[in-house]
Amino acid sequence: MKFKKVAALLLAGVMCAATVVGCGKSNDGKTDSTTTPKADESKASEEAKTTAEDEKLSATITVWSPAEDQDEKNGNWLKTRCDAFNAAHPNWDLTFKYSVCGEGDASTNVTKDAAAAADVYMFANDQLQKLIDGGAISRLGGDVEAYIRDTNSEAMVNTVTVGDAVYGVPYTANTWFMYYDKRVFTEDDVKNLDKMLEVAGSKNKKVSFKLTDSWYIASFYVGNGCTFFGDGTDESAGIDFEGEKATAVTNYLIDLTDNPAYMTDDSGSGIAGLKDGSVAAFFSGSWDLSAVEEALGKENVGVAQAPTYKLGDKEIQMKPFTGSKAVAVNKTSPNQKVATQLALWLANEESQKTRYESRGIIPCNTKLLDSLKDDKLVAAQNGPSIMQPFVSKMNAYWEPAKTMGQQITSDACTHDNAEEKTVEMNTAFNKEAL
């Protein structure tokens, strides 16, 4: 993820790990050209239809998306939207092929062989530089870039921008928050993690957290002043998990894992615990909304931003990473014009609206967000956060942070060696800069 500086990546609650699945078997099929598009399709997509209506062409377009977008229980969202795109372009004779590829796997699967990959795919923005380096993503410009800038916050636009180039059409923020059982916790209880553990313990329940996942564990350290690359873009500043500010957090996490009301969420154990009643709080993103509702019953699901925790005499606010998920065009696609317009279509206002309705994926379109300002799910996702850097040296963060979580949960990291282990972690973060 080599990086040309992007502007203003740190933020605190201004924006709205993806389900990780590999690319699956293709499902070839001609789209239904008789589908009638909805009257309120985005202006940009309607303009694309108008400018192309006299141009006849025939093409096969391959699209990769998460499995949930292709699930019949979600109305086969992807095929439905591609059908609508086809209907909006009657002079384009398009056949679509669909395969499963989660946003978190996009850079790995697309860059294996960009020429054999999808024309259009979804990706998590932290993979952007790898996609650029792999020659697997097209720069967007013209009316498409204008639409992206006009319908998203500056912070959201920055998540898909390198230098002055925009590379993806965002459709949601990529962050996590807290789900909880309203039969166990009150809205006041869930403001503080230590209070939650106290309440959960009194009711023989557990609070489940992905401590061995480096995407989640950072929230504790960042809350207490640890930083990534200065403002998030200065590689020379490195990752600063040095000194007492970091060691104190490590000691807190050791105590956390020793609490009988705590459980490390690993390999789906958090969702399983919600189902069997042993877990009363679970940390994840909007992609798990349906699973949580199924586990608890929709009426029992509470949502809240990441809580605070008590460190000595200080109240520390946990700060999750946040970024975006976006639709990209493969730079090797022989059908750049069609692919670009389809990418825009799959992330336009109507697509974000229907995705929210079918899957609970919170939109990032500013108009839609304004209409959802009273939605508690939106408020939870918009809690305090830190922009996830996508500079190249961020690659050195993931494994050492994961190792720290594993050492804490396995008791290999104790109060006796907490400082030593924290120093080792910080050194590993910055080894490429030495």
Image (tube, rainbow, N blue to C red):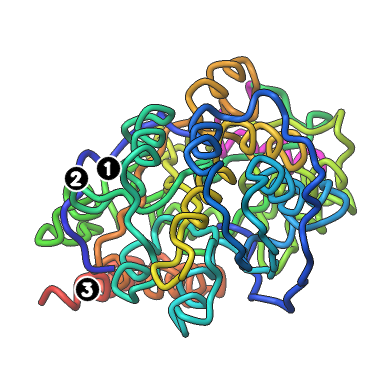
Callout 3 secondary element: helix
Q: Position of residue 274 (x, y in %)?
A: 82, 49
- CA separation in Å, label 2 and label 3: 20 Å
Residue that mark 1 sits on: 9
Task: Give the magenta part as a residue range.
Answer: 188-203
Marks 2,1: beta carbons within 8 A: yes
Determine if the magenta segment contains residue 202.
yes
Identify residue type, mark 1: Leu
Residue that mark 3 sits on: 427
- Name the residue: 44% across, 40% down: 318
Q: Position of residue 350 (x, y in %)?
A: 63, 32
Mark 2 or 3, nearer chain start: 2
Identify residue type, mark 3: Thr
Marks 2,3: beta carbons within 8 A: no
- CA separation in Å, label 2 and label 1: 7 Å
Q: Position of residue 209 (x, y in %)?
A: 61, 54
The reply to whether residue 376 is visible in this rendering is yes
Quarter location, residue 87: top right
Q: Is residue 165 left or right of residue 264?
A: left
Residue that mark 2 sits on: 231
239 or 418: nearer the eye? 239
Quarter location, residue 70: bottom right
Mark 2 or 1, nearer chain start: 1
In the rendered image, the quadrant that contains the N terminus is: bottom left
Is residue 97 depicted above or below 255 in this figure?
below
Give the mark toward the camera: 2 or 3.
2
Mark 1 or 3, nearer chain start: 1
Q: Main secondary structure of the magenta part?
A: helix
